[in-house]
Image (cartoon, grey):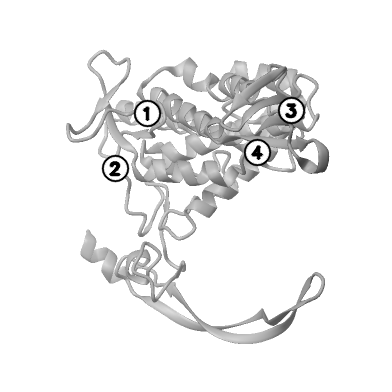
Amino acid sequence: MNFLPSGISFVLSLFICWFTSRVGSSWWYMGRPTLGSQVMCDNIPGLVNKQRQLCHQHPNMMQSIGVGITEWIRECQHQFQHHRWNCNTMARDHTLFGRVLLRSSREAAFVYAISSAGVVYSLTRACSQGELESCSCDPKKKGSSRDSKGTFDWGGCSDNIDYGIQFAQAFVDARERKERDARALMNLHNNRAGRKAVKRFLKLECKCHGVSGSCTVRTCWLAMADFRKTGDYLRRKYNGAIQVVMNQYGTGFTVAYKKFKKPTKNDLVYFENSPDYCIRDHEAGSLGTAGRICNLTSRGVDSCEVMCCGRGYDTASVSRMTQCECKFHWCCAVHCKDCHEVVDVQTCKALKNTDWLDQT
């Protein structure tokens, strides 16, 4: 039964619909491989005018962003594969993550950061590979410079990460800059932290020239590290994410608890505590851990005790093929046999009806 007056109930329904479409970054849906650039520009709900404009003007860049979306989602799932929340996407949901991001939690902070980083990475890589007409290698890397080993000449193809950051900021941040509410400020902060994370791992790569590789002359360029480094870094930032509240002027953050340090531009920030993700809860965006594989011998977050939230687990024998008796053959190959083995796999039990009643 609905105990709210009809007028209030109607307004609340409108607010929920607005908030749902407001928080979900629908540009993430551009990672679906079946969508062409024209479809992405015209039919994805929730894109603001600035995003649709950039989408129409730069269709090739949208395709690169689509590839990047697939990669950062895969990286997110790698980072959280052994946790209760495992960055699962929701089928037939244009926000990809369902309602989990409605809560301004540290999971939302990580997703916004890694998604922003993924756009920077994919666009910068596409520039260096000559896939985009609007950008190329970094044109500023010319002449000579010095490092700890001495003087070197700029050459090769330095990754034009400043261009990737500039376009990613214009496209990804467009929605948040239009809203400018508390959640938008949180998203903007975490988006920026993600972009900065990619640039953090630029590395100098060099090629030696001279007689017998004497390295009398070096040619160097700046290259992005593997995206895994960015994922690992942002995962550590997730662990140390700082809970904040809006300041009295509504223009920025202050720490929620005095014992916390003030967040830097590299830190992730969040407003709300996370749910425990133990049971399926549509309102909280939790898929629950029923049926998830757990590690019987672990004492970490992937252990059966932690993963299953004390509900217990089922054990089943599973048959699988593995490579065994591998031998090195000169030169240069490793030959293995296919071996059959049976292993025990533990999966978390579902919540019993009586358990649910005990919690109400």
Closer-to-camera residue (80/348): 80
Which residue is at the front of the view, 54 or 298?
298
Which of marks 4 and 1 precedes in the sequence?
A: 1
Q: Amino acid at mark 2?
A: Asn
Q: Position of residue 33 (x, y in %)?
A: 73, 43
Secondary-structure class at tag 2: loop
Say which label, 2 or 1, has the lower sequence index: 1
* Label 3 SS: helix
At a point 34% along the width and 74% down the height, the residue shown is: 312
Of tags 2 and 3, the one toward the viewer is 3
Occupied quadrant, residue 135 = top right
Rate crowding at label 4 as few (under 14), some (14 to 19) or many (20 or more) other CA atoms within 10 Å.
many
- Residue, disc 1: 10
For the residues labelled 4 and 3, the Cα–Cα distance comes to 13 Å
Is label 1 or label 4 in front?
4
**Residue at (70%, 34%) from the top-left corner?**
125
Q: Are marks 3 and 1 in contact (CB under 8 Å)?
A: no
Residue shown at 37% from the left, 54% from the top: 277
Mark 4 or mark 3: whose residue is earlier in sequence = 4
Upstream in sequence: badge 3 or badge 1 = 1
From the viewer's perspective, tell me whether residue 354 is left or right of residue 94: left
Residue at the spot 34% in from the left edge and 42% down from the top edge: 240
233 and 274: which one is in front?
A: 233
- Which residue extends farthest left? 258
Label drawn at residue 68: 4
Which residue lies under the disc numbered 2?
273
